[in-house]
Amino acid sequence: MSNIKFEEITEDQQVKIPENLVFGQNFTTHYFEMDYETGKGWHNPTIKKFGNFQISPAALVFHYGQAIFEGLKAYKHADGKIALFRPDENIKRMNRSASRLCMPELDMDLAITALKDLVKLEHEWIPTKPGHSLYIRPLMFANDPYIGVKAGDKYKFMIMLSPVGPYYPEGFKPVPILTTDKYVRAVRKGVGDCKTAGNYAASLLAQREAKKEGYTQVLWLDAIEQKYIEEVGTMNIFMQFKDEVVTPNLTGSILPGVTRMSVIDILKDWGYNMIERQVSINEVVDAYNNQNLIEIFGTGTAAIISSVAKLKYNDTIMKFSDEHAGELGTKLYEEILGIQYGEREDKFGWMNYID
Ligand SMILES: *Cc1c(COP(=O)(O)O)cnc(C)c1O
């Protein structure tokens, strides 16, 4: 074991594992917490009972938004082995978010150890039904009680665990997406490439308006010209044209997804002409009209792959299928899930086992 402190809990504080798992609603008995203070560094790494905690109403995070998070999953394989999918990439990304927001970086080894110790302790919570997993949510925020804009001197880092069923309980179903040019998500040189809380608050209104029109998610365009495709909600986006598969290159306003990165590697390995480049919404509409656009799908940890049923842009509705996910999206979904559940060869060495 590491130098992580463990606070014993009593039998009656043990939380029962619920029967029906709804995404993001149930939390395991324990979570991980650690404090930071300028001059002292990270200290007090502790695994303790998950529950409410006290914080000053003046805590910097509530007023000036220094909050970053991550999302990854743990899987239990048929042979009982427990594995995380590329956790080092999530911690690296969290450290990039931290440095952009003047927050302290994590020690890689300590963060990975904390993830593993916590998941190991709560291994009974990892659901084994198909499509189920244990969602892991690391979080960091500034908690100095101080009113006045400044970078905090005090931070908390936490890891909470939530068992989750399949993202789409009714099966891998395509989703309708609305392109918005009424709002923007992020500007280049801003914080769009960081998993920071404010980005999501900023996206809610567009999301709400899309829902009213019957669309599940919003496709964001670049903030300057409202011309180039960026990403969808909490997913990166891929378009399969006749002779290439394209995803927008990382320009600074797009969140660099771990699933995105993995899909790029798999497609290249499969021999696809996988290109990262700027792609305008007009190019996509033209390709659709010329029957040059085969399918569109999103990528992200929660759903892995999300096939696009239809994509609306102004008066154009590009229709794919409401019923069936696209062929390439399905193939990728099966491949990545297969790797994550230990049923397919992990040739890239992405799975990180907990022993
Ligand atoms: C988390 C996230 C993604 C997907 O990243 P993964 O690492 O693949 O889960 C894409 N876009 C946004 C805005 C996100 O927050």
Image (cartoon, grey):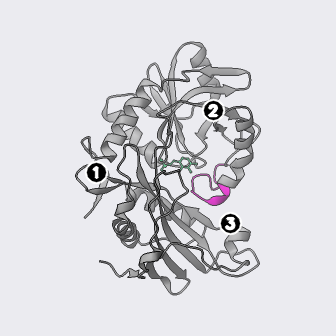
Q: Quadrant of the N terminus?
A: bottom left
Give the prevailing secondary structure in the magenta stretch.
loop
- Which residue is at a point 36% across and 41% down the rendered structure image? 336
> Between marks 3 and 2, how big is the CA–CA gap?
29 Å
Which of pointers 3 and 1 lies earlier in the amino acid sequence? 3
Instruction: Say whether marks 1 and 2 touch (CB < 8 Å).
Output: no
Residue bearing the label numbered 1: 77
| Segment tinted magenta in the rendering | 187-199
Which one is in front in this view, the residue at disc 1 or the one at disc 2?
1
- 76 on left or right of 183: left
User: Pointers 3 and 1 in contact (CB under 8 A)?
Assistant: no
Q: CA distance from mark 1 to mark 2?
A: 34 Å
Q: How many marks?
A: 3
Residue visible at 52% across and 80% down in the picture = 35
Characterize the local packing of mark 1: few (<14), some (14-19) or many (20 or more) Cα atoms within 10 angstroms.
some
Q: Secondary structure at mark 3?
A: loop
Residue bearing mark 2: 177
Instruction: Point out residue 350 in the picture as x, y percentages from the top left corner.
Output: 31, 50
Q: Earlier in the sequence, mark 1 or mark 2?
A: 1
* Left or right placement of residue 306 versus residue 121 in this view: right
Residue 227 seen in the figure = no
Asked if the stretch drawn in magenta spans residue 198, the answer is yes
Is residue 141 magenta-colored?
no
Residue under circle 3?
Answer: 65
